[in-house]
Image: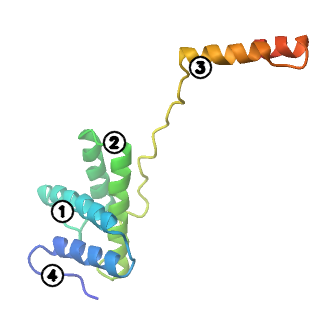
């Protein structure tokens, strides 16, 4: 299949990709809508910076992701956008629209480490109280209190 041509070929690339995801891959409606939003934002950024999907390079995609970070977008949002971009370029490569996939080796932002939930005062007191009374003998009870 030849690459879409004419006015706004980048938008046609995205439309064709989304149609294929819906028809061939059986992607859910919300997935298609999410891909669409992510890719429209990417296309707007590319157009503003004078780039096209046909000529995009790895540096172009990385610059977009840096711009997303500068806007304060969360890691999860940036990871999702990169996933959408990867899917689009993989599709373009498989369709023969591009001879390469510039998004294939781009490292994502990763997930942010979450801190464990802290216990409230009442929960701590309940644990200490339980440790005081638990154990087969006095030695076990002392050990349990020390562990707490």
Q: Give x and y (percent) for residue 96.
A: 33, 83
Q: Which mark is residue 74?
A: 2
Q: Within 10 Å of the Cα at label 2, are there few (<14), some (14-19), or many (20+) other Cα atoms?
A: some
Q: Earlier in the sequence, mark 1 or mark 4?
A: 4
| Residue 115 circle label | none
- Tell me the SS state at disc 2: loop
Q: Which residue is mark 3?
A: 123
Task: State which tag comes first along the sequence, 1 or 2.
Answer: 1
The residues bearing labels 1 and 2 have C-alpha atoms spaced at a distance of 24 Å
Closest to the camera, between mark 1 and mark 4, is 4
Cα gap from disc 4 to disc 2, whole angstroms? 34 Å
Tell which residue pokes out farthest to the left in this image: 7
- Residue at image location 41% in from the left, 56% down from the top: 106
Residue with the mark numbered 1 = 51
Q: Position of residue 4 (x, y in %)?
A: 19, 81
Tell me if residue 144 can be seen: yes
Q: Against 82, is 92 above or below?
A: below
Question: What residue is rendered at 49% in x and 37% in y?
Answer: 113
Query: Are the residues flagged by discs 4 and 3 in contact, CB closer than 8 Å?
Result: no
The residue at which mark 4 appears reads as 5
Of tags 2 and 3, the one toward the viewer is 3
Residue at horizontal 18 percent and vertical 55 percent from the top: 45
Counting residues from the start of the chain, the first of labels 2 and 3 encountered is 2
Quarter location, residue 50: bottom left
State the image coordinates of residue 60 (x, y, percent, origin top left).
27, 57
Callout 4: SS: loop
Looking at the image, residue 122 sits to the left or right of residue 20; the answer is right
Distance between the Cα atoms at labels 1 and 4? 16 Å
Q: Residue at x 36, y 55 (%)?
A: 80
């Amino acid at each position: 299949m030849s690459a879409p041509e004419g006015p706004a070929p980048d938008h046609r690339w995205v439309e064709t990709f989304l149609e294929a995801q819906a028809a061939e891959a059986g992607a859910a409606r919300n997935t298609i809508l999410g891909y669409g939003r992510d890719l429209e934002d990417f296309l707007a950024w590319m157009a503003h910076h004078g780039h096209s999907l046909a000529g995009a390079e790895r540096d172009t995609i990385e610059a977009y992701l840096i711009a997303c970070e500068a806007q304060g977008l969360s890691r999860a949002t940036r990871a999702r956008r990169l996933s959408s971009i990867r899917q689009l370029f993989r599709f373009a490569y498989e369709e023969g629209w591009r001879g390469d996939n510039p998004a294939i080796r781009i490292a994502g932002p990763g997930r942010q480490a979450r801190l464990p939930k802290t216990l409230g005062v009442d929960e701590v007191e309940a644990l200490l109280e339980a440790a005081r009374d638990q154990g087969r003998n006095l030695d076990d009870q002392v050990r349990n209190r020390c562990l707490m």
